[in-house]
Image (cartoon, rainbow, N blue to C red):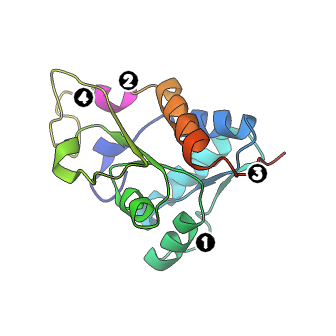
């Protein structure tokens, strides 16, 4: 979710992690200091041995960058890791909910931006003023998985699958 708050939380990370791991990809759940419990919950809910959370390690910005630099793909909300991925030429799927894509556009050719277009958004609010959070809940894991697999196919064909 990043420092922006709950408005950027995507509730389907565990399902996505499980789907990627079942296809042979290792998954690392990165988080900021305020998101440690959420990262532990995501990794546990994924229920796959190739999904790990680094929440027990105090991740500095530098260590987070070092990890992102070595990834084949980053799936993130509109937050810091998105920009780290761009800086290190790592393909990235960015999940936009309440924030407007155009305000932080990076024009990175290895990026896919996903956002559900709803009448209420993007509202730029830290919490959903209508209480439903549809901008993130309706962004389906299937759509994110498809974009992720396509970027992996296009830009990381040499990635070895765990298994």
| Residue 10 picture quarter | top left
Along the polypeptide, which appears first: circle 3 or circle 4? Answer: 4
Along the polypeptide, which appears first: circle 1 or circle 2? Answer: 1
Mark 1 vs mark 3, foreground winner is: 3
Provide the residue designation for mark 4. 131
How many numbered badges does the structure rendering display? 4
Provide the residue designation for mark 3. 160
Answer above or below: position of 58 versus 84.
below
Foreground residue among 93 and 131? 93
Quadrant containing the C terminus in the rendered view: top right
Residue furthest to the top: 119
Along the polypeptide, which appears first: circle 1 or circle 4? Answer: 1
Question: Does 25 sit left or right of 1 as displayed?
Answer: right
Query: Could you say where residue 91 lies in the image, as x and y percent from the top left?
Result: 49, 51
User: Between marks 2 and 4, how big is the CA–CA gap?
Assistant: 14 Å
Tell me, yes or no, if residue 88 can be seen here: yes
């Amino acid at each position: 979710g990043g420092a922006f708050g709950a408005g950027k939380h995507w509730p389907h990370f565990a399902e996505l992690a499980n789907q990627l791991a079942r296809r042979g990809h290792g998954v690392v759940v990165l988080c900021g200091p305020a998101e440690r419990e959420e990262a532990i919950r995501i990794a546990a809910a994924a229920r796959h041995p190739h999904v790990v959370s680094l929440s027990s390690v105090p991740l500095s910005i530098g260590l987070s960058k070092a990890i992102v630099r070595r990834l084949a793909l980053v799936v993130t909300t509109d937050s810091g890791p998105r920009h780290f991925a761009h800086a290190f030429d790592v393909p990235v799927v960015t999940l936009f909910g309440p924030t407007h894509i155009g305000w932080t556009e990076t024009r990175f050719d290895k990026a896919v931006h996903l956002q559900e277009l709803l009448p209420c958004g993007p509202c730029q609010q830290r919490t959903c003023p209508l209480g439903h959070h549809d901008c993130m809940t309706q962004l389906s894991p299937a759509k994110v998985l498809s974009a992720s697999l396509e970027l992996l196919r296009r830009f990381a064909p040499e990635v070895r699958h765990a298994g």
